[in-house]
Amino acid sequence: MGDGGQRRRWEYCWVVLNFSLLLCLGEKVSAQIRYSIPEEVKEGSVVGNVAKDLGLDVSTLVERRFRIVSGSKDALFHVNQNNGVLYVHKNIDREVLCDGNNACLINLKFVVENPLEIHYVSVEITDINDHSPVFPEKDQHLEMPENTFPGARFELQTARDVDVGLNSIHSYKLGQNAHFELQLIDSGEGDKIPFFILQKPLDREQNTKHMLLLAALDGGNPPKSGTLNITVTVLDVNDNRPICTQDEYSVTLPENALIGTIVIRVNATDADDGQNGVVEYTLGRTIKRKIHEIFELDHVTGEIQVKGQVDFEENEVYRLNVQASDKGQPPTSVDCRVIIKIGDANDNQPDIDVTSLSNTVSEDSKPGTVISLISVTDKDSGINGKVIGSISEDIPFELKPSFQENVYSIVTKGRLDRELVSHYDITITATDCGQPPLSTFKTLSVQISDVNDNSPEFSPKHIELYLAENNVPGASIFYVSASDKDLNENAAISYHIVREGTQIDMASFLNINSDNGDISALKSFDFEILKTFQFQVVATDSGTPLLSLP
Ligand SMILES: *[C@@H]1O[C@H](CO)[C@@H](O)[C@H](O)[C@H]1NC(C)=O
Ligand SMILES: *[C@@H]1O[C@H](CO)[C@@H](O)[C@H](O)[C@H]1NC(C)=O
């Protein structure tokens, strides 16, 4: 009690002495008593017996009008005048009452009258773990180019926990993942900022998005936590070249294909995104000009179309390089090889080539005499290109195959007779085996040359003539004429009269012009002496051998 009284006096003196100071400093005075209660305690909870602790006589409190005069802060506390106990009157939320991390103190000013005493009491509101860590937003989006180097750092949201001390943010935890590690860096203001550190290279073509969960934990017991959903979008880099879907595109195109026919479609794919993955097709620069005239490439679709005349006989196979490039900056590209084989159509007639020809053939040629060599060819290939030759049936010639394919000889088949047919037109037909077959004709003109195979002939062979007697000697009395079917020398006729040595040869009195057969008598005949006589005229041609007939 003595102690209490001394303290009371001292306090009183202190109060009086400092009265002017109090006015100046307001509530900032040292409290005589300090209580401590946790926040959120039940209404009616006892803070302490203020009167007792101040050493006041509890029985006089009513009479001396013991009360709180200030600092009750909307009457958070209430004091009982009957016993001097300080109660919690309202729910106390430390975080509402005291923003920040400093100790949360509520100063109460008590008064008793007669004599007047002023006492200062402070109540410390201690923190309980009644808040969880909270991130400013529920999720965070990060974008990283796929070529970001490992080691790169990305700042994450910092969580807040309005509780203090151990009840505030204590640690962060990152969900299991292959690419990122968490690093905490001191902000310089007492808290730590979480960062992502990239651990291994990203690949957009494998994984476009990474979803991660970051948890912030406080140090309470038990701890409370808050989470942040982090989405990492991997941005594309042009790190893939286009790839042809086939090593080589091969197709057979029939010749004479219509313009506009789609030959083949080249397809290259690129795993990259956006323009980096858009493929454009061009014909390689090394391509022969002719190809540009025959084929057209669609830059967008990679389709190759027929644009000009496709001719097997001109070119059997075309090799194209199609360059597929993406539209990245810079672009990457690949060459796709295309082979277009041209299928042969039976669009060519066979050719007949006469390699040797005798324009004339002797009528006495033996059967089998070769008069001409011909070859038949066809530009088309395969069974198409196979050719069969033939010649007209009704002539004394035939076509004989030789040991060489497609080479034939034309030979005589039967007897020739110039006097019957002096000239032949031999028609050769060459037909290929295509569908439908195509044919070519060629006509050879052959003259039959003469041999001396006909004798001169008189017609009629016997002539009776009457001659008047007393004819004038030397005058023409008659003429004979023979014919010969042969030609030229073989038909050039001379005449003479046959003389027979023994009997009285009347022929010796006759003369014949060997060229024209004109007969003249050398003497004058007398009917009374010679009434009739016979003679023979022979006609001879000039051929070899000489042929003659009386
Ligand atoms: C966060 O991610 C979890 C699972 O990863 C999911 O269940 C939840 O809906 C996500 N929350 C938000 C806000 O996206
Ligand atoms: C190209 O090839 C890819 C991969 O094989 C395929 O998915 C796509 O459909 C093809 N495009 C065309 C137009 O055929």
Image: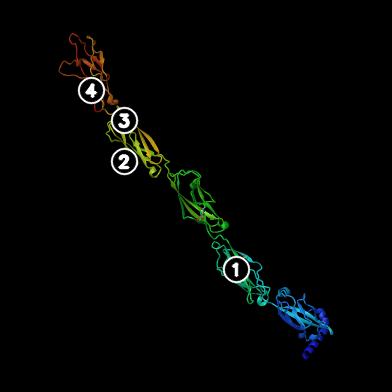
The residue labelled by disc 4 is: 549
Check disc 3 and report the residue beneath it.
Answer: 448
Tell me the kind of residue under disc 3. Answer: Ile
Horizontal side of 428 relative to 112 (left or right) equals left
Q: Earlier in the sequence, mark 4 or mark 1?
A: 1
Under mark 4, the amino acid is Leu
Measured Cα–Cα span from mark 4 to mark 3: 25 Å
State yes or no: Cβ of the residue under disc 1 lies below 8 Å from any atom of ligand 1.
yes
Q: What residue does disc 1 label?
A: 213
Q: Earlier in the sequence, mark 3 or mark 1?
A: 1
Q: Which badge, 2 or 4, comes first in the chain's sequence?
A: 2
Figure quadrant of residue 94: bottom right
- Where's residue 464, x and y in %? 23, 14
Residue at horizontal 38 percent and vertical 38 percent from the top: 431
Position of residue 179 in the picture relative to residue 60 (left or right): left
Query: Looking at the picture, does residue 291 appear above or below residue 517?
Result: below
Which secondary structure, mark 1?
strand
What amino acid is at disc 2? Ser
Q: Which circle's residue, 1 or 2, is located before the other in the chain?
A: 1
Q: Is residue 378 above or below residue 48?
A: above
Q: Describe residue 370's horizontal placement relative to residue 222 as left or right.
A: left
Q: Mark 1 is on which residue type?
A: Leu
Q: Which tag is nearer the camera, tag 1 or tag 2? A: 1
Image position, residue 272 (x, y; %): 55, 59
Judging by the rendered image, the residue that carries numbered circle 2 is 402
